[in-house]
């Protein structure tokens, strides 16, 4: 009989599930990868076999040619709620994480012990993906991107209202919204539609394919047009969405006098917005805020919490103050995706 | 308070100066008295609430939130007021249920004025409870007086002038005769009432300023030259009134610095407005300049000890007494002489000088030069530490506020340059809080190939572009070898060409030297560190 939880190990490039020789969100190519979602700091190409939700596999096919031809490796789709048996007697169940399309927490069970890897998650409603489900476990491996008590994300309706107000106030300009190409962009579009904005929305070329993929998976995004196909003057009074890197780039010169907005949880801190020359900060995040991180730990109530990436010091401190066991993992290559 | 908070937020996120002016002007037009007057005072740093300090906020927060969580949050944000405004709800943990509606700006100011060190601990939280995060940010910025939103007091005055279509020079002249919330100023500008009566008020008058000379060559028949002294430009104002008279000292930006230099207040007792350089006496270094060996000024280092103080000790007054070296005059014995030509004003000033105490006043000597070439030679030859360069003034120029082309030029001495090695870096504050933007650099204490060490010689945080800052930040992050709290020690692989105005003996650094106004002149990504300069090279640049 081996020591409790000795079958799961934290290594610099990912969580190693020893009996199955499988890795959760590995930062390098491995024989068998269990992937929580499609963001680049969790998903990558070159694995021998990739186990993920069908939506995540579709995103990985688009981005990394995963499962596409002989060099793309094998893929195993797992539906939400479905359990698959891995070698070495390990069961893996994929549970909605509420982060982006296809995002999942992975519940690993072995020898009567339960471990959850959340990947990235949020607790707010999102029209583009099913909501996070609280699931009991022994070890809860959580993210901590916004793990500081100053991060409390406001309701998204207010942020949408700010955006639409500014748009209406400047009919001769456009509002350029910086949003991460996978997840944030589609969520912002879907929320704009929910807020009653049915004008065409203009996209940076890098957004197009991912938006189409979302639509193929049943997420309605309304009329989308490409900036590249549109004369400058036609975009006056409209919303344009681009990756954050394009905000202060030469690319934006083709837009009619843009007002620069940025949809990110970091926008809560004024100086962060100023550094990026943002005129209209929109505090919209696909991650749990401080209260959600701590509430989730309380609800899941694990024996021990492992913290993968983000502001882990503060979340560790919170666990200590609440007499909860926790440790910070030193994973490499995890980034704040909005930065 | 909501409108004021919205204004602050808009100002924070606005880059363009014109747009900032428009936002402030719009607010001033739309907001009733006295709220707009208090807001204008807050924007121009005219409010001070002694009971509320940054440390007050810190202490209030640490009673409500774990100190470790507070520190981690404060470090991330880089600004105490903003951190507190964001943490307030979390810290209260939802206990602030039904509280009163948000206070107005005037109500806020009245409440802050009434607070003392003891009551602030309960009264400030009560105000915070009535506001949303933007309102809390505005309140804490207002209370601590450190706005840091890219609005100078000058910008506030220009915006006021724009809002009501009046002359900014007039606004400047009335400004110091009035106190917040500036009721008479608004009555004059907004409602067309009579201008504020400043007849017997010691108000500030806008300075006449100079353009850099650069490539211009002037004819010495039309221009007079004088030394540009290395102190701070001041305006001394004395008016006679019923209570015997009042004197004030204003800085270049129009801030009242009378309390910092009380000895000057007693020195001027004749109605006048004088323009000059404030210097301190002491360890004399300025003995060489000019044919009459005019000097007696200590280095800027000595003056620096006295700047920014609200009270001055007797010891300090005795050790580093201030005096003013006069350049010009705007009013002499109650008569406004600004319309006169410079040469006539100069003559009047020379005649007036004997009536002033020699202990506190002298006059900046004219540098005689037959030709521009001769002047250039004199400029090259000066080694006096109290001299920053030369001023060239058109002999027939009236005294005109601001920088009018062709009338006055400044011709600064070339900076000194030395190659140093980057040793330590620290994060900046405010807008630079996520960048390692403050650099400590050093020179070799011998031959680097024979085991010499680097010793710190100075610190700089300017002179580079935003692009370069990003590269430097990346360099620091990837070349960190050690951390001491907020300080990163780098692998000492990068050479800076550092420009500075002068260098002095100093006990502050291990190298025994301190530079004045060092800035990064060039980043020498290409230069091997062993080719950086040695301490003795820097020491040889001490002028005395």
Image: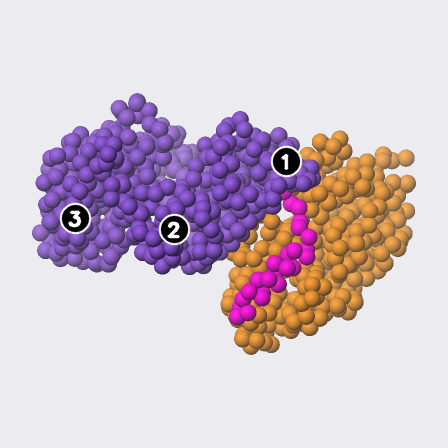
Q: Is mark 2 on a helix, strand or loop?
A: helix
Q: Camera-side residue: A38 or B263?
A: B263
On screen, B44 above or below B218? above
Few, some or many C-alpha atoms within 10 Å of disc 1 (few <14, some 14-19, many ≥20)? some
Left or right of A43 in this view: B115: left
Which chain letter matches label 1? B
Q: Of discs 2 and 3, which sits in the foreground?
A: 2
Q: Which residue is depicted at the point 53% across and 45% down?
A: B104
Could you tell me residue B106's position as x and y percent? Answer: 49, 43
Q: Chain letter for mark 3, please.
A: B
Would you name the residue on which mark 1 appears? Answer: B69
Say whether disc 3 or disc 1 marks the residue closer to the N-terminus: 1
Closest to the camera, between mark 1 and mark 2, is 2
Q: Relative to the observer, which residue lies in front, A46 or B163? A: B163
Residue drawn 16% across the image and 45% down it: B335
Q: Residue B138 carries which label?
A: none
Does residue B18 lie above or below B185 as drawn? Answer: below
Q: Position of residue B414 (x, y in %)?
A: 26, 48
Q: In this figure, which residue is indicated by the disc labeled 3?
A: B337
Residue B243 appears in the rendering: yes
- Residue A63 shows in this picture: no
Most foreground residue, B414 or A179: A179
Whole-percent x and y of residue B424?
Answer: 47, 38
The kind of secondary structure element at disc 3 is loop
Q: Are marks 2 and 3 on the same chain?
A: yes
Q: Is residue A80 rendered to the left or right of residue A163?
A: right
Image position, residue A298 (x, y; %): 78, 39
């Amino acid at each position: 009989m081996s020591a409790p939880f000795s079958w799961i190990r934290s290594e610099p490039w990912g969580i190693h599930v020893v009996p199955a020789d499988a890795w959760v969100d590995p930062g390098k190519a491995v024989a068998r990868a269990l992937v929580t979602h499609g963001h680049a700091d969790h998903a990558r190409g070159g694995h021998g076999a990739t186990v993920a939700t069908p939506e995540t596999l579709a995103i990985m096919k688009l981005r990394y040619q995963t499962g596409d031809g002989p060099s793309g490796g094998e893929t195993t789709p797992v539906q939400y709620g479905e359990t698959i048996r891995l070698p070495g007697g390990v069961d893996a169940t994929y549970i909605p994480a509420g982060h982006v399309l296809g995002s999942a927490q992975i519940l690993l069970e072995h020898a009567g012990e339960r471990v959850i890897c959340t990947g990235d998650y949020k607790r707010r409603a999102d029209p583009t993906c099913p909501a996070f489900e609280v699931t009991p476990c022994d070890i809860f491996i959580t993210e901590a991107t916004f793990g500081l008590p100053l991060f409390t994300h406001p309701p998204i309706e207010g942020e949408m209202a700010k955006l639409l107000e500014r748009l209406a106030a400047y009919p001769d300009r456009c509002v350029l919204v910086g949003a991460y190409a996978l997840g944030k962009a589609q969520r912002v579009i879907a929320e704009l539609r929910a807020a009653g904005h049915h004008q065409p929305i203009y996209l940076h070329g890098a957004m197009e394919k991912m938006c189409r993929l979302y639509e193929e998976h049943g997420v309605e995004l309304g009329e989308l047009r490409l900036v590249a196909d549109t004369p400058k003057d036609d975009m006056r009074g409209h919303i344009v969405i681009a990756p954050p890197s394009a905000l202060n780039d030469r690319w934006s010169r083709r837009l009619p006098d843009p007002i620069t907005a940025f949809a990110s949880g970091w926008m809560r801190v004024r100086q962060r917005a100023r550094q990026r020359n943002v005129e209209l900060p929109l505090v919209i995040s696909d991650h749990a805020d401080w209260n959600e991180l701590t509430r989730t730990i309380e609800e899941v109530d694990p024996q021990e919490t492992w913290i993968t990436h983000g502001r882990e010091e503060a979340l560790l401190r919170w666990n200590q103050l609440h007499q909860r066991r926790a440790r910070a993992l030193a994973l490499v290559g995890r980034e704040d995706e909005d930065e | 308070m909501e409108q004021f908070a919205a204004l602050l937020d808009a100002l924070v996120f606005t880059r363009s100066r014109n747009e900032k002016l428009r936002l402030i002007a719009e607010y001033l037009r739309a907001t009733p008295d006295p709220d707009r007057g208090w807001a204008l005072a807050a924007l121009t740093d005219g409010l001070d609430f002694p009971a509320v300090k940054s440390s007050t906020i810190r202490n209030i927060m640490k009673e409500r939130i774990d100190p470790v969580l507070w520190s981690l949050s404060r470090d991330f944000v880089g600004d105490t007021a903003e951190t507190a405004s964001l943490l307030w709800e979390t810290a209260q943990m939802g206990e602030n249920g039904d509280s009163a509606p948000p206070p107005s700006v005037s109500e806020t100011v009245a409440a802050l004025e009434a607070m003392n060190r003891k009551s602030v601990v309960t009264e400030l939280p009560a105000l915070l409870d009535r506001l949303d995060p933007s309102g809390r940010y505005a309140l804490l910025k207002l209370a601590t007086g450190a706005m840091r939103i890219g609005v100078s007091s000058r910008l506030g005055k220009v915006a006021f002038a724009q809002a009501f279509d009046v002359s900014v020079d007039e606004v400047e002249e009335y400004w110091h005769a009035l106190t917040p919330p500036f009721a008479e100023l608004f009555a004059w500008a907004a409602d067309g009432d009579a201008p504020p009566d400043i007849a017997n008020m010691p108000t500030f008058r806008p300075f006449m300023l100079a353009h850099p000379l650069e490539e211009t060559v002037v004819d010495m028949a039309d221009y007079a030259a004088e030394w540009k002294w290395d102190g701070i430009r001041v305006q001394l104002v004395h008016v006679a009134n019923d209570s015997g008279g009042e004197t004030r000292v204003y800085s270049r930006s129009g801030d009242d610095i009378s309390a910092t230099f009380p000895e000057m207040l007693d020195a001027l007792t004749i109605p006048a407005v004088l323009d000059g350089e404030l210097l301190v006496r002491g360890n004399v270094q300025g003995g060489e300049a000019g044919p009459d060996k005019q000097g007696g000024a200590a280095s800027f280092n000595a003056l620096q000890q006295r700047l920014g103080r609200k009270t001055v000790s007797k010891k300090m007054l005795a050790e580093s007494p201030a005096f003013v070296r006069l350049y010009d005059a705007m009013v002499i014995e109650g008569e406004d002489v600004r319309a006169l030509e410079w040469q006539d004003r100069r003559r009047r000033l020379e005649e007036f000088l004997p009536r002033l105490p020699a202990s506190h006043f002298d006059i900046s000597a004219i540098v005689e030069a037959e030709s521009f070439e001769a002047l250039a030679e004199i400029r090259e030859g000066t080694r006096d530490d109290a001299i920053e360069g030369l001023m060239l003034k058109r002999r027939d120029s009236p005294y005109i506020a601001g920088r009018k082309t062709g009338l006055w030029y400044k011709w600064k001495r070339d900076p000194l340059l030395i190659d140093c090695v980057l040793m330590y870096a620290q994060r900046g504050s405010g807008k630079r809080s996520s960048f390692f933007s403050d650099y400590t650099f050093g020179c070799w204490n011998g031959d680097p190939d024979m085991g010499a060490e680097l010793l710190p010689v100075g610190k700089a945080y300017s002179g580079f572009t935003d692009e370069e800052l990003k590269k430097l930040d990346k360099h620091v992050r990837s070349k960190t070898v050690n951390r001491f709290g907020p300080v990163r020690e780098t692998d000492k692989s990068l050479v800076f060409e550092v420009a500075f105005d002068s260098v002095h003996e100093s006990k502050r650094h291990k190298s025994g030297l301190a530079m004045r106004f060092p800035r990064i002149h060039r980043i020498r990504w290409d230069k091997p560190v062993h080719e950086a300069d040695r301490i003795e090279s820097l020491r040889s640049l001490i002028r005395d």
